[in-house]
Structures are given as C-alpha cells and as structure tokens.
Image: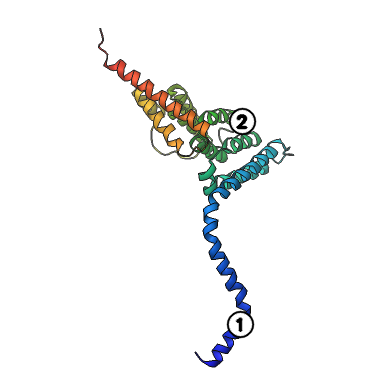
Amino acid sequence: MSLALTTKITKFLPTLAPFICLAGIVTLQSQEYKKSAQKLNQANYLSQEEEQARLIKFQRQTPSLSFDNLKADWSYLNFVQYFGDKNARETIGYKLIPDYFETISNIDPYFVQAHLRLSIANSMYAGDPEKTITLMEQVLESVDPESEQAALLWTSKGLDELLFLGDKKAAIKSYKMAAKWAALTESSHPKGLTIKDLEAALESTNEIELKQAQIRAWSSVLGYIKDNQRKRQIITKIERLKAEILVLEQDNVKPHN
C-alpha cells in the first residue's frame, strides 16, 4: 500500500471509529434481541390490538356528520392494515375482525365490497360464521339489490349457511335471492350451476355428506384461531358432528324389518 493512501486512511480513522464501534455493538446485541423478540412482539401486538379496539369503539360512537362513506372507508382501511399485519395475526390471531365488520356495516350498509371481504375474513379467520350471517342479514335489509356485486352477498351468506351450519333450506333460499338480485343487473353472468342444479345437488346430498363438509369447514378455521376459548368451542362442534355421523352410520347398517 502506498504511503499516500496509508496517510489518507489514517486521517479518516477518527471519523470512522464511532461507526466501527457501533457496528460491533449491534452485532453483539443482535443475538440477545432475537431471543427476546418473540416475547416483546407478543406484548407489543397485544398493546397495539388494545389501541385498535379503542379506535374501533371511537369510530362506532363518533357521529358521521353526513360523511358515512368517508368514515366507512377510514374504518375499512384500518381493517385492511390490521388484517395485513401477518406477523401480528399469526401471533395473536384475528379477534377484532367481528368488531370491524359490525362497525363498518353499521356505518355504511351499502359498502358491498367491504362486506364481502369482511364476511369471508370473519367466517374463516375469526371463526365466527354465525355472527357473519347475522350481520349479513342486517346489511341485506339496506343494500340496493341493483348495486354492483350485491347479489354476491346472498351467495356468501348461503355458503356459510351450508358449510358451517349445515342448513340446506336456508342456503337454497339465499341462493335463490342471489339469482333474483343478479337478474336485476345488466352485467353478464358466467355460465355455471343454476338454482335448479344446486337444489338437485343438495337434494342428493345426504346428512352424512353434509356433516362431513361441515367438519372440513370448521377444521379449516382452527389453524387461524388463537383464542383458546373459541378454539375449544370449535373443537366441540367438530366432535359433536363426528358423533352425529357415527349415529347416522350405525342407523344405516341396522337391519330394517
């Protein structure tokens, strides 16, 4: 190395020294940070969730002052941010989704796209399809049947009624309403199962098959649930369905007089 280059580097060493020390400190501390990060994150996530819960309550109680759309958009953007925080959701779950759904549906029952996304999130990730159906019924009383994608609200409701509740009659009724609303719009509809096809398919679906579908639906939810009480409730539902299937199978093999 030339004398001139050595001289230049020597001149810069006092300036670089703090950064070199800082780099060393960061490296030494990184391992300790990794050990405590998980516990800290969980505490932080719970603290953030408490703040979000307070914000939801504030949004629900604050008057809209004729700005329902703007307020609903704000709430929905908060939900998107909440739902999209993958690390937080994998750590503490999706407990606030029902609160977001209820708040947005009360602020703006005409917000169809939000309701569609919230209904799926509430049923699959929060594991509360019963509340989803209740909220969808309230929304459907107010929404314009001719608004874009409004018919899909009935389809979503019917899917929950069928897969989670095992209620074929309610599901068929919802699908009929979906077809009725879809016919009111000018948009073209993809070729697929008609209501008659669906009714025929459900008529040929026996109780055992329907309960097996319910078990698969509820089982798919379990992986997202972090709340132990709700998880136990879902496991109890699954065990009850399995017991009901066993009884039906035993009845089917009994000799008939």
Location of residue 102 in the rendering, given as x and y in whole percent from the top left corner = 61, 34
Instruction: Give the x, y percent position of residue 254.
Output: 27, 13
Residue hosting label 2: 142
Give the number of the disc on residue 12.
Answer: 1
Residue at image location 66% in from the left, 36% down from the top = 107
> Quick check: 139 above or below 207?
below
From where the camera sits, is residue 68 visible?
A: no
Q: Where is residue 184 shown, x and y percent of the image?
A: 52, 33
Instruction: Please state which of the two labelled residues, at mark 1 or mark 2, is closer to the viewer.
Output: 1
Q: Amino acid at mark 1?
A: Phe
Outermost residue, top side: 257
Q: Nearer the viewer, residue 104 or 98?
A: 98
Judge from the rendering whether residue 185 lies leftward or rightward of residue 142; answer left or right: left
Label located before the other in sequence (1 or 2): 1
Which of the two residues, 15 or 81, is positioned nearer the viewer here? 15
Q: Secondary structure at mark 2?
A: loop
